[in-house]
Amino acid sequence: MTDLLHTGLGVVHDSPPVIVRQASPPGDELTDRRNPEVRVLVVDDHAVFRAGLTAVLDREAGVVVVGEAADGFEAVDQVLMLRPDVVLLDVRMPVLDGIAACARIKDESPETRVVMLSVSEDETDLYAAIRCGASGYLLKEISVEEVARAVRAVHGGQSLISPRMAGKLMDEFASLARRAEESPRSTSAPRLTDRELEVLRLVAEGLNNGDIAKRLFISQNTVKNHVRNILEKLQLHSRMEAVVYAVREKILDLG
């Protein structure tokens, strides 16, 4: 495995995927010591790809595929029935596409992490996935062995983006920052406390709950409470989405 290179947003691999370390979702621990098994739902309209991915994941210790689905509607039904920890979700699918399915999954089961696994390098798909609360966006060029690693990372509270897509996300951050400088701050933007802004800024730097707690000299539970409050105030699903929103609305200055 290649060495890890630290960047402003987190930990970047020389090979896919980029890992953006994030604070854990409200009320969740990075690892459930009593049940280390990660329950995965595989969603793809190509049966051969789906079967191959399932076979590889089933050979991984601590990972179990609890179900499969061939379209977005079926994926939502399976999530409600099986309550998986992580959903691997294709973007381009018939009946209901992956972006719409992700939005429904996060509405119905906010605790479920969704990773988009796609051939699409369209930045609009990436931004839409983030807005819908996806915890990752990986291109299908990733090796199947790396998918298992990605599943564990996302279950542990991280967000992952394939390197080429991460570059596009950074471009979007820069564009948002420029537009924010040129326009007045929205008067309708929710008011975050100074401490919440500090936490959000550290999330943007790629720090996890433990690192943020040490930096601010507070407990990890307090960090979780701040993250929960931030997401509730902004009415958003994910930390990555919160950072994008904060830059756009001039709530947060990453410069």
Image (cartoon, grey):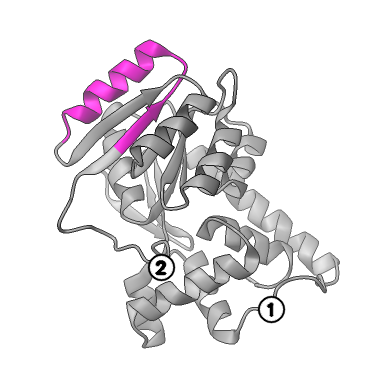
Residue 210 image offset from top left, x and y in percent:
32, 73
Residue 89 image offset from top left, x and y in percent:
46, 31
Residue named by callout 2:
207
When the figure is inspected, residue 162 is found, relative to residue 20, above or below; the finding is above
Residue named by callout 1:
191
Label 2: few (<14), some (14–19) or many (≥20) C-alpha neighbours in 10 Å: many
**Where the C terminus falls, by quadrant?**
bottom right
Left or right, residue 179 beside residue 37:
right
Q: Magenta includes 198?
A: no
Q: Magenta includes 46?
A: yes
Q: What's drawn in magenta, residue-wise?
A: 40-60
Are circles 1 and 2 on residues that touch, CB within 8 Å?
no
When the figure is inspected, residue 71 is found, relative to residue 109, above or below; the finding is above
Residue 242 image offset from top left, x and y in percent:
59, 62
Judge by depth and name the residue closer to the eye, 208 or 72. Answer: 72
Residue furthest to the right in view is 183
Left or right, residue 54 beside residue 6:
left
In terms of image quadrants, where is residue 220?
A: bottom left
In terms of image quadrants, where is residue 148?
A: top left
Q: Measuring 48% from the left and 63% from the top, which residue is drawn there?
A: 8
Label 1: few (<14), some (14–19) or many (≥20) C-alpha neighbours in 10 Å: few
Q: Measuring 37% from the left and 28% from the top, which residue is drawn there?
A: 42
In terms of image quadrants, where is residue 70?
A: top left
Mark sitting on residue 177: none
Query: The disc labelled 2 sits on which kind of residue?
Result: Leu
Query: The disc labelled 1 sits on which kind of residue?
Result: Arg
Q: Measuring 28% from the left and 46% from the top, which residue is drawn there?
A: 152
What whole-number distance in Å separates the C-alpha atoms at marks 1 and 2? 23 Å
When the figure is inspected, residue 98 is found, relative to residue 44, above or below; the finding is below
